[in-house]
Amino acid sequence: MSSPLAWLLGKESPRCGCTGECGREHRAGGCTVTHPSELMVAPLDPAKDAVTPLSVPESAQGTWCHDCHDLAVRIIHARIELRFLESASDRRTPSSLKGAA
């Protein structure tokens, strides 16, 4: 991902730095969104999306387009929900049935 600070200060041309975290295959090595109005700065790790971006060090932030960021956060939330549902299912299944197929 490109440096968000360099982009904000105008030292670097803006470009979404997603390389597939959103679940889409980006040809040419990454997302091609470059228009500044379509870009934002957010944590590189979409799981930290709930954290105020200013509390995340610059080295852990990146430039994202809104679509890639939204999809990456949705993937993380879906994985968290799946883990929760799996663990809840394990707690409700009687131990005598856990090994049966």
Image (cartoon, rainbow, N blue to C red):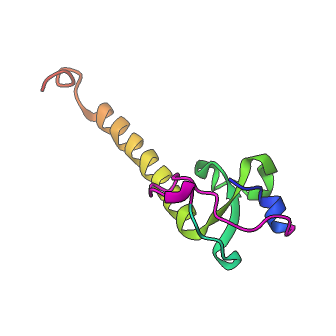
Residue at coordinates 49% horizontally, 58% vertically from top-left?
27
The quadrant where residue 31 appears: bottom right
Horizontal relation, residue 86 to residue 52: left or right: left
Q: Position of residue 96 (x, y in %)?
A: 18, 20
Total number of numbered discs in the rendering: 0
Depth check: 9 or 28 in front? 28
Horizontal relation, residue 22 to residue 56: left or right: left
Q: Which residues are magenta?
A: 9-30
Horizontal relation, residue 37 to residue 6: left or right: left
Q: Position of residue 21 (x, y in %)?
A: 53, 52
Furthest toward the front, the residue is 28
User: Is 86 contained in the magenta span?
Assistant: no
The quadrant where residue 24 appears: bottom left
Residue at coordinates 70% horizontally, 76% vertically from top-left?
36
Q: Position of residue 60 (x, y in %)?
A: 73, 47
Q: Quadrant of the C terminus?
A: top left
The quadrant where residue 23 appears: bottom left
Q: Position of residue 7 (x, y in %)?
A: 79, 65
Furthest toward the left, the residue is 101
User: Is 12 contained in the magenta span?
Assistant: yes
Magenta stretch: helix, strand or loop mostly: loop
Residue 85, above or below 11 = above
Furthest toward the bottom, the residue is 37
Residue at coordinates 49% horizontally, 50% vertically from top-left?
76
